[in-house]
Amino acid sequence: MSIIISKGSLDGVYPGLIMANGARAEGIEANLFFTFFGLDAIHKARHEHIKIATVGNPGLHLSTWLGGVPGMSSVMTHYLASKMEKLDIPSIPEFVDMIADTGAGLYACKASVDLFGLTKEDFIPQVQDIITVGEFYEKAAGGQIIFT
């Protein structure tokens, strides 16, 4: 299974991590391809500070104006983090470590890395490589690709 993570918010990163973890638990090979703002999940300086997007997020059932109130994103992130902690759901850095430890592949998208002026040194050590989309397709080997 190959999973593309393209969003840099809690609700954009967790689904891919949960799916990769589930695949590995079932003995299914898994590769994660982080692109665009999804790179934040593997960026050394950002992976511990990912928040939930409150503006324009219909799943929160908040008015757009309320989602835009200064500090609302931090409040909602803290609220969700406390609920996830009670459910023993690991933080993003812990989850990425767990998934990498199971042998899943973690890759950064070369086009996005170049676009944002990043290098391999900007990423956590579990990132195996910076690869092109074509190389990602080769790793998928005709298997299922999921876009979160």
Image (cartoon, helix red, strand yellow):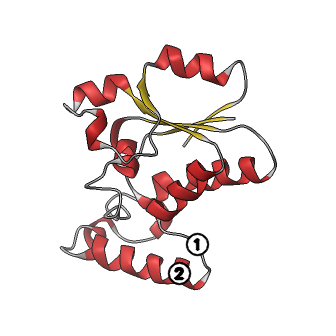
Residue at screen point 72% across, 53% down? 22
- The relative height of residue 41 versus residue 108 in the rendered view (above or below) is below
Quadrant where the N terminus sits is: top right
Q: Secondary structure at mark 2?
A: helix
Question: Which residue is at the far right?
Answer: 26
Q: Which mark is residue 136?
A: none
Residue 137: image quadrant is: top right
Neighbours of disc 2 within 10 Å: few (<14), some (14-19), many (20+): few
Work out how far the residue at label 1 is from the one at label 2, CA to CA, in angstroms: 6 Å
Neighbours of disc 1 within 10 Å: few (<14), some (14-19), many (20+): some
Q: Is residue 141 left or right of residue 36?
A: right
Residue 66: image quadrant is: bottom left
Residue 50: image quadrant is: bottom left
Residue at screen point 46% across, 69% down? 60
Q: Secondary structure at mark 1?
A: loop
Q: Tags 1 and 2 in contact by the CB under 8 Å rule? A: yes
Quadrant where the C terminus sits is: top right
**Foreground of the two, 143 or 24:** 24
Q: Is residue 27 left or right of residue 67?
A: right
Q: Which mark is residue 85?
A: 2
From the image, tell me which residue sits under label 1: 89
**Foreground of the two, 8 or 39:** 39
Residue 5, position as x, y percentages in the image? 49, 41
Q: Is residue 28 left or right of residue 44?
A: right
Residue 54, position as x, y percentages in the image? 34, 65
Type of residue at label 1? Ile
